[in-house]
Image (cartoon, helix red, strand yellow):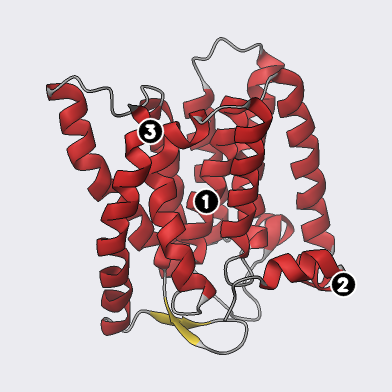
Amino acid sequence: MTWVGLPVAVAVALLVVPAGVRGLRDAGLVRENYRGVRLAFPLGAVLATAALVALAPLAFLDDRADLDLLDLELRRWIPYLLGMAFLGFLDDSLGRGDAEDAPRGWRGHLGALREGRLSTGGIKAIGALALAAYVVSGRGLESWAYIADVALLILATNAFNLLDLRPGRAEKALAILGAGLCLGAWTLAPLELLGIFVGPILVGAWFTLRERAMLGDTGSNLLGAIAGIWLLTTLGGDGRLIALAALAALTVYGELRSISKTIESVPPLRWLDSLGRA
């Protein structure tokens, strides 16, 4: 019955997410998006909270009533999911945001570190490495495979930071990835494993697409963590290496070129990117 987590999380999110968006606005927690519209921010904190609210009864019933409501592997991955959301929240709260001289990308954060400055983005990168190394350990992998899986998890998380520059883009990418993995492997295991986190994201997508809230690094980190875990737990060894190569290429491209401009220049991608947007 591990599939129960997704509908329960959706039901909880329908109550928690709208209230959370209102709470962010009432507290003055807003930020301008690329069009200058002031949105509730960071929505990712609300999504992580909704997932925890859904987890509470499921965890209790899973243990006390022996109902098999949660995938046992969730225990391995939840530190990475919540840890990356926290690191994103740290960046959202203490980072310098849109300051012109704020470090950006891997090169920017490494440059700041060489100058003796540790940016919140740098802290996030170090924390991601530590968390990924921890959750991937103990799986009986060869040294090279362990390093490759750690890199895959980190690059997947970073990729959703690169994608989250327009409303709903990161959520669409996660939906496409999830659908592809489920259909390709002919399994619902990805949704059964992380359904309690996917549910709030599905509800939250309505608010991002309608330009009522912004994910922030808190949300994009959470989505990227889900994507990375899905890749690690669904693909075989060769598939993970192919995914790693693709993510490495996307990371390098994102450092050198504008992903948004590339999407705008390709009609099918532009249509998909704007689908459902206000």
Q: CA distance from mark 3 to mark 2?
A: 39 Å
Residue 3: give its label: 3
Position of the N terminus by quadrant:
top left
**Amino acid at pointer 3:** Trp
Q: Label 1 is placed on what type of residue?
A: Leu
In this view, 196 is above or below 91: above
253 or 263, nearer to the observer: 263
Q: Find disc 1 in the rendering and name its residue.
A: 223
Residue at the extreme left? 64
Residue 253 higher or lower than 52, as above or below: below
Residue 146 lies in quadrant: top right
What is the x, y in percent for residue 263?
80, 67
Res. 96 in view: no
Q: Residue at x 43, y 42 (%)?
A: 81
Q: Nearer the viewer, residue 166 or 271?
A: 271
Residue plotted at (12% across, 23% down): 64
Q: Earlier in the sequence, mark 3 or mark 2?
A: 3
| Amino acid type, label 2 | Ser
Q: CA distance from mark 3 to mark 1?
A: 19 Å
- Residue at mark 2: 265
Q: Residue 149: x percent and y percent?
A: 64, 27
Disc 2 residue crowd, few under 14, some 14–19, many 20+, Cα 10 Å: few
Instruction: Determine which quarter of the picture holds residue 218.
Output: bottom left
Whether tag 3 and tag 2 are in contact, CB under 8 A, the answer is no
Helix, strand or loop for disc 1: helix
Q: Indicate which disc, 2 or 1, sits on the residue closer to the N terminus.
A: 1
